[in-house]
Image (tube, grey):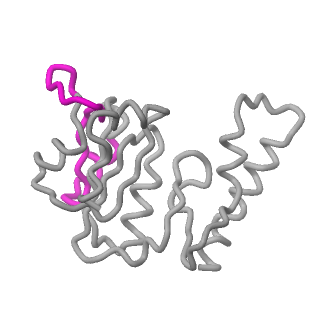
Amino acid sequence: MRIFYSNQSTDRQRLLISYLSPKSARSSFGPFYNALVAEIVCSWLARVGNVNDGGKWTCNPWALPDNCIIYSLGVGPDITFELETFKVSEERCKIYSFDPDPKLGQRLVDLKSDRFVFTPLRIAAETNDALHQKTVADIMKQFSHSFIDFFKIDIEGKYILTFKNEGIPSSAF
């Protein structure tokens, strides 16, 4: 665990120095919070992926079971979360990523691995194939999944609207 955090320390320092600089054109506290190490009750808490916006705080990503299913809603331009989760899980997981912009997932497609599945669609409160949007429940049906081992969501503030009709299918976790 110590080595894992040590490897990220230089990036964290650089990000904090840049953010706290008087010349910084900051518009939000997001980058500042991303550089901090979170405090939560988890003996194996780890920031997986970039220490900036692309990474996410997770609890014991090393304990993911064999053949685990990961859903990553909202890929964005930074795929370090997906790549590092794959590495940390020792390639045991299959990662299903979703983003409405097909260009953002192209780097995952370019890996040519059957362990990465990218689908260009928007996660929404209602499925509408004409608009390339689906609910999480319909995506799970499409892939014949009854359970998700790890669920990452980063869909730029649309969390409540996305799950207003059905909620997050908690029986799937």
Of the 4 image quadrants, the one containing the C terminus is bottom left
Q: Residue 93, image x and y in percent?
A: 28, 67
Query: Can you tell which quarter of the image residue 26 is in?
Result: top right
Is residue 117 one of those drawn in magenta?
Answer: yes
Placement of 126 over or under 168, stated as above or below: above
- The boundaries of the magenta stretch are 106-132
Placement of 18 over or under 49, stated as above or below: above
Q: Residue 127, image x and y in percent?
A: 18, 30
Q: Residue at x 81, y 33 (%)?
A: 24
Q: Residue 34, image x and y in percent?
A: 65, 50
Q: Residue at x 64, y 69 (%)?
A: 7
Q: Which of 36 and 168 is in front in this view?
A: 168
Q: Residue 74, image x and y in percent?
A: 39, 40
Q: Residue at x 23, y 37 (%)?
A: 135
Q: Which residue is drawn at 21% across and 62% down?
A: 147
Is residue 77 one of those drawn in magenta?
Answer: no
Answer left or right for 132 relative to 4. left
Query: Can you tell which quarter of the image residue 91 is in?
Result: bottom left
